[in-house]
Amino acid sequence: MKKNVHEIEVKVEGKDWENCLDKSFKKKNKEVKIDGFRKGTAPKEVYIKKFGMESLYMDAIDCAVEKAYQNVMKDNQLIPVIEPKLDVKTIDEKSVTFLFTIITKPEIKLGEYKNLKIKKETPKVTKEEIASEIENLRNQFAEISLKDEKEKIEEKDTAVINFKGYVDGNELEGGNGENFPLEIGSNTFIPGFESGLIGLRKGDKKTLELTFPENYAQDLGGKDVKFDVEVMEIKTRVLPEMNEDFFKDLGYDKVTNEEELKTEIEKVIQERKEKEIEDTYLDACLEKAAENMTIDLNDEIIDDEIHRMIHQFEEQLKMQGLSLEQYAKFTGVDHEKLHEQMKPEAIKRVKYRYLLEEVAEVEKIDFTEKEVEEKTKEMAENYGISKEELIKAYGSIDIVKYDMKMREAMEKIRA
């Protein structure tokens, strides 16, 4: 067992346990109907005879565990880094014994984290990058136009479709949709689906006979599938002309021709590349410093970070109108695969977090209350919100301070 894993046994008995059982009885008694008594009026011995003492244990545990946990934390001066694990070892009408497994911060030994001799690139902007950036901007400002019934679906068009999938003659669960906007070439669906629509017109119907990739989830890997598809409408992008109206839409009021636009775009790309290089350099410094550090990470800490990342990913999907289940259907990446895919990034995040915390401690990085207040005010102004709104978004002003310390620790590493 790792040094930062603490197993602590706590026994709740006597009056404390009796009180919890009593509270459980009063709650349960109001929920059940016993012949000859109104709800909540049956004597305890009558209730116990009918439902048994065991029926009170679950709520009684909830009552007892909170105080038991508080005592554990107070007596042992422990700071858990993830949610503690709870096991009920023994339970009867006289007592309950809990086993708390508490994981604290792992042992960390810093290696070299300064003067890491990592080379920083010099940004260069090519003509091809400028042309590509302008083309992307034209696509962003493109107008969406409906194609008429004679025009066909082409690459990059958006086909609005109704579709229904069948596997082994049965309708595919989650494999259907109505008025679904599908950008051709986005690789949203399995291979062959999008390319199979090219050339169709509005109102056309087609059956696509495809095969799921071998690594597809839900036991569909390698199986044949049929999709009945109907094209409801076709949308295409009409790119804007390279004129002053377009330049003004981009925010360049003084630009009058394409060459001047290229000069402005070059500046934008240069600034972006400088930031990307700085970010890459910082990440390389963090990676090197983390490699030089010795840390014995618990699997539980890594899993906790993965679950946090999956939850964030789920929230992002919701903003796109998708659930994790739908994502799994479309991509073949189920929860288990997602967990494995996110593991390397989770390990990196956890290591970096502990690295920065340790550097902050070694370097004695701290900020006064006044400095934190000033920084909070500055950040709020930058975001265009009130100081109170910023603190609410962070959770507390202590987290703002923590963030300041982590950023200062980064500066120590990248110096």
Image: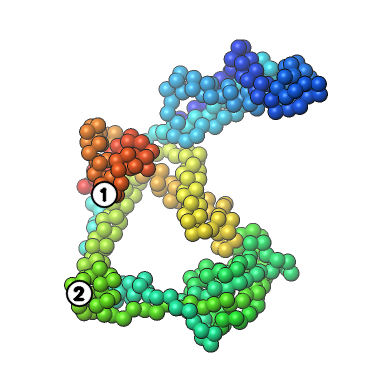
Residue under circle 1? 382
Total residue callouts: 2
292 with respect to 148 (left or right): left
Name the outermost residue toward the right.
35
56 with respect to 149 (left or right): right
Instruction: Inspect the image, locate mark 2, and give the three-letter code of the amino acid beneath it.
Output: Val
Q: Position of residue 142 (x, y in %)?
A: 38, 75
Q: Secondary structure at mark 2?
A: loop
Picture quadrant of residue 334 = bottom right
Q: Residue at x 51, y 78 (%)?
A: 234
Name the outermost residue toward the top.
15
Instruction: Note whether residue 292 is visible.
Output: no
- Alpha-carbon neighbours of circle 2 within 10 Å: few (<14), some, or many (≥20)? some
Query: Quick one: label 1 or label 2, which is nearer the N terminus?
Result: 2
Instruction: Inspect the image, locate mark 1, and give the three-letter code of the amino acid beneath it.
Output: Asn
Q: Nearer the viewer, residue 313 or 35?
A: 35
Residue under circle 2? 255
Question: On screen, 52 above or below 285?
Answer: above
